Image (spheres, helix red, strand yellow):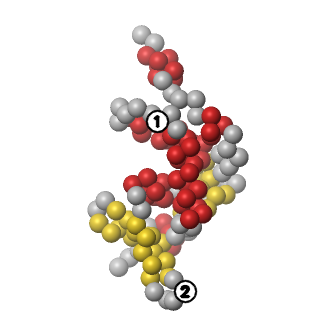
Amino acid sequence: MFSFLKKKKDLPEFDFIKSYSDKEKYFVRIKKWNWLNPEQITLLEKGVDGKIKMTTMNYWLQEMFLDADGQKTILDYLDILIKQFRDNKMEIPSDLDKFMVETLLSLKTELKAIEFSDSPTEIKNEFRNPIKE
């Protein structure tokens, strides 16, 4: 009868996100990309030598890059991921918040593929869609 109460109770505490200082930041992609095959994208950038560098990513890096539309905060995104786990009847990992933040930080600092902002941001046209062949 009160199944909605049970679902809330099953949710992990997510203490990591509570103390994460950038949880209210928006994130947007800032790198050109293209489909490598129907399941995988590659990031594209011109190196200092003028050659094109292609970077492929694991599933989660790719998903979060494609979701980086500048219209949701990191905290909002956690709710989206929780909903996806629930919709797929999957157990929600207790460290989902930490994993998500670490993945976003990797996209931001290591791959330089997204950036954080204090307010909603539009994706620049050159990064919105895959590169046209």
Marks 1 and 2, the one that precedes in the sequence: 2
Is residue 2 something that shows in the picture?
yes
Can you tell which mark lies on residue 93? 1
Q: Residue at 50% across / 34% down in the picture?
A: 94
- The local secondary structure at tag 1 comes to loop
Asked whether disc 1 touches disc 2, contact meaning CB atoms under 8 Å apart, the reply is no
Q: Residue at 68% across / 49% down in the picture?
A: 22
Q: CA distance from mark 1 to mark 2?
A: 40 Å
Report x, y in % for residue 43.
Answer: 45, 70
Quick one: quadrant of the N terminus? top left
Q: Residue at 51% across / 83% down in the picture?
A: 47
Quick one: quadrant of the C terminus? bottom left
Q: Is residue 20 left or right of residue 50?
A: right
What residue type is disc 1 on?
Answer: Pro
Give the farthest residue toward the bottom.
49
Q: Quadrant of residue 91?
A: top left
Is residue 77 something that shows in the picture?
no
Q: Residue at 53% across / 29% down in the picture?
A: 12
Q: Is residue 27 above or below residue 90?
A: below
Report x, y in % for residue 34.
Answer: 39, 70
Report x, y in % for residue 87.
Answer: 38, 34
Q: Is residue 98 above or below residue 133?
A: above
Give the farthest residue toward the left.
38
Q: Which residue is mark 2?
A: 48
Q: Is residue 93 left or right of residue 112?
A: left
What residue type is disc 2 on?
Answer: Val
Q: Is residue 112 left or right of residue 91?
A: right
Report x, y in % for residue 88.
Answer: 35, 36
Q: Is residue 13 above or below residue 64?
A: above
